[in-house]
Image (spheres, grey):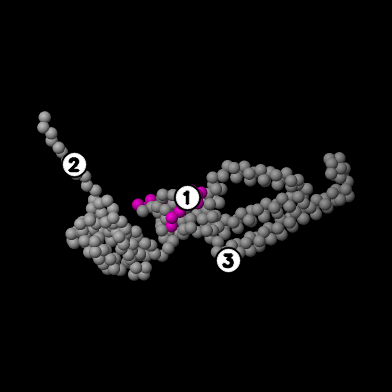
Amino acid sequence: MDFESMKAAATNPEALMALGLPIAKSLLAALAIFIIGRWVAKIAVKVARAAMSKARFDDTLISFLGNVLYGLLLAIIIISALGKLGVDTTSAAALLGGAALAIGLALQDQLSSFAAGVMLIMFRPFGKGNFVDIGGTLGVVEEIKITNTLLKTLDNQLVWVPNSDVWGNTITNFSAMPTRRADLTIGIGYGSDLKKAKEILLRLMEEDERILKDPAPSVLVKELADNSVNFAVRPWMNSPDWWVTRCELIEKIKLEFDANDIEIPFPQRSVHIVKQDD
């Protein structure tokens, strides 16, 4: 309706009533779309969250995706309601899309970390409390957030690692399996008693209750090296006991070898000085 028509309607009560009726209908229709649409959106989000929970998605991911879904549905509802009021929704949608693109370009690093966080939460290469190596950073996982992973290092420092770096790096989860094997290379001198050394190695592993009987520990002659006969010593243990048990076993081997006159070779260099007469 142009300005002249509105001016004429303002001086004519019947025309004014005729003009107000469509506006009132449009307002009521827009309000109905908004109220009913928001109610439907809440139900849809509730159903989606229930489906994700049934699929065992992480609670953080369920909450975030639920909020994103609700925001998108609400934006569609508002644009639809504005369309009922005669607003050019094409321009509104274009403006919304442009704003989303600008925000995406400005926050591309954060969005990359978010996408990586979604992958970490969905595929679960590690969980809270696991001891991991992420791109050379060793630590216990304290918390997995949607954009960062918090690690506590062995010297009790907290390290925030962006999830984009976590997902883009090699991940070693030392806690993933209930048991682990320690692979030790123990060398003895060529003049030492090989059978006696092997018996000592097997006995030390049998006496340690933390070393599993199944799979059984093994001692094999690995190689005849330049300066030593090398054994491959392979005990199995529960993952939480791995580090301490391994270190204590190495200490026991050294003490037992010393007590039984079994030589553990180490690099040596002989220097011969030849004195020449003038």
Q: Do we see residue 255 in this rendering?
A: no
The percent position of residue 83, horizontal first and vertical second, equals 76, 50
User: For the point 46% across and 56% down, which residue is it?
Assistant: 143
- Tell me, yes or no, whether the highlighted magenta stretch contains residue 63: no
Q: Give the residue furthest to the top.
A: 278
Q: Quadrant of the N terminus?
A: top right
Q: What residue type is labelled 1?
A: Asn
Secondary structure under the numbered disc 1 in the rendered image: loop
Secondary structure under the numbered disc 3 in the rendered image: helix
From mark 3 to mark 2, how far is it between C-alphas? Answer: 74 Å
Task: Give the vertical position of 15 relative to 63 (above or below).
Answer: above
The percent position of residue 134, horizontal first and vertical second, equals 44, 51
Can you tell which mark lies on residue 169? 1
The percent position of residue 135, horizontal first and vertical second, equals 44, 49
Front residue of 262 and 138: 262
Q: Which amino acid does label 3 sit on?
A: Lys
Secondary structure under the numbered disc 2 in the rendered image: loop
Q: Do we see residue 275 in this rendering?
A: yes
- Tell me, yes or no, whether the highlighted magenta stretch contains residue 157: yes
Circle nearer the viewer, 3 or 1: 1
From mark 3 to mark 1, how far is it between C-alphas? Answer: 30 Å
Q: Give the residue furthest to the bottom.
A: 213
Can you tell which mark lies on residue 54? 3
User: To which residue does mark 2 refer?
Assistant: 271
User: For the point 25% across and 54% down, which residue is it?
Assistant: 228
From mark 1 to mark 2, how far is it between C-alphas? Answer: 47 Å
Q: Are marks 3 and 1 in contact (CB under 8 Å)?
A: no
